[in-house]
Image (cartoon, rainbow, N blue to C red):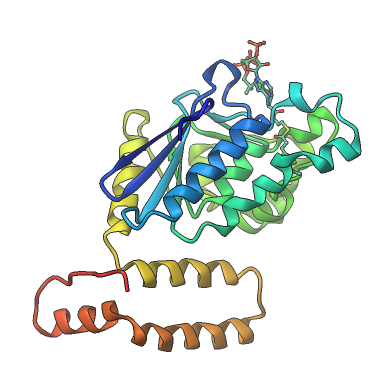
Amino acid sequence: MSYEFILTETRGRVGLVTLNRPQAMNALNNKLILELMDALETFDNDNGIGAMVVTGNEKAFAAGADIKEMADKSVTEMMDRDHVAAFGRILKIQKPVIAAVSGYALGGGCEIAMSCDMIVASESAKFGQPEITIGVIPGAGGTQRLTRAVGKAIAMEMILNNRTLSAQEALQFGLVNRVVPNERYLDEALKLADEIASRPPVAVRVAKKMINQAYERTLTDALHVERQEFYNLFATEDQKEGMKAFVEKRKPEWKGK
Ligand code: DAK
């Protein structure tokens, strides 16, 4: 499928989605969001893909939802818009998604990055939730995901007073996995995705799901589900192969089943 505001390609077992609206700092208009979700779902359904990377350009990952598109909307128009529901579709992606962020990741851009499973940042990445400056609050998870990631004190400053985090601060506060020089951030994210894509796919999928459950369930309940999921993996060929390969001192060959 061809898209207007994103580019897609595959690199081995990694699906790469590049937000491609550079003249507008990759502002997330309705169509771009729908295209992004469609691309991620297509990769998620492709057995040849084991992990995905979402990136922008060096200057902007995404500077938020498209303010020009939103400015005159009524409450009902906002609630009816496709992209509102579409934002949630990223949370249903089962394979790992890594955000490779350089430049601005603001508002909905920061929220998309935080909805990914890991963030690789360039040295010039900037994270912020500036919605307060245009009279609103984050609406796609910012008040919740940011608070869980960086803690209440920093989240309060960012959301109430438009504090922007540098890449190093984002690393220090636990928002990103690693910070790498500008010329290497995408390669680093692709390498990480490639490594994860070489792991047993069913176990990777279950592990991602269980980590995300840490924010949804009580500890007792989640530990119970984790144990059950662990047992369930003994029904996979990959568990047999992984343990046999260890005993035989060789590299496992994963089947993804
Ligand atoms: N929307 C529309 N256009 C944008 C944009 C945005 N968010 N950000 C930048 N642009 C456009 C600029 O208008 C400009 O266009 P032209 O004037 O050339 O036509 C072009 O991109 C270049 O931007 P600048 O000239 O401003 O470039 P600078 O380097 O001077 O500044 C900047 C870059 C990123 C600091 C600045 O552009 C900026 O502050 N942008 C706005 C950042 C912002 O406020 N973002 C938050 C938007 S609100 C929800 C889902 C999502 C959301 C809410 C709910 N649901 C599912 C319920 C999300 C809300 C938001 O993100």
The image position of residue 44, as x and y in percent, is 45, 54
In the image, is residue 208 above or below residue 176? below
- Direction from residue 203 to residue 134 in the image, left or right: right
- Direction from residue 107 to residue 239 in the image, left or right: left
Give the quarter of the image for residue 198: bottom left
> How many labels were placed on the picture?
0
- Name the quadrant of the N terminus: top left
Q: Residue furthest front?
A: 1
In the image, is residue 240 above or below residue 155? below
Q: Which residue is rendered at x = 31% and y = 34% of the image?
A: 184
Q: Which residue is rendered at x = 86% and y = 24% of the image?
A: 72
In the image, is residue 62 above or below residue 208? above
Q: Residue furthest top?
A: 23
Inspect this view and state whether residue 165 appears: no
- Direction from residue 78 to residue 153 in the image, left or right: left
* Along the line of sight, the residue nearer the viewer: 181 or 35: 35
- Direction from residue 170 to residue 248 in the image, left or right: left
Q: Which residue is rendered at x = 35% and y = 56% of the image?
A: 50
In the image, is residue 224 above or below residue 255? below
Give the quarter of the image for residue 127: top right
- Name the quadrant of the C terminus: bottom left
The image position of residue 119, as x and y in percent, is 47, 47
The image position of residue 179, as x and y in percent, is 41, 41
Inspect this view and state whether residue 191 appears: yes
Q: Tell which quarter ligand 1 is in.
A: top right
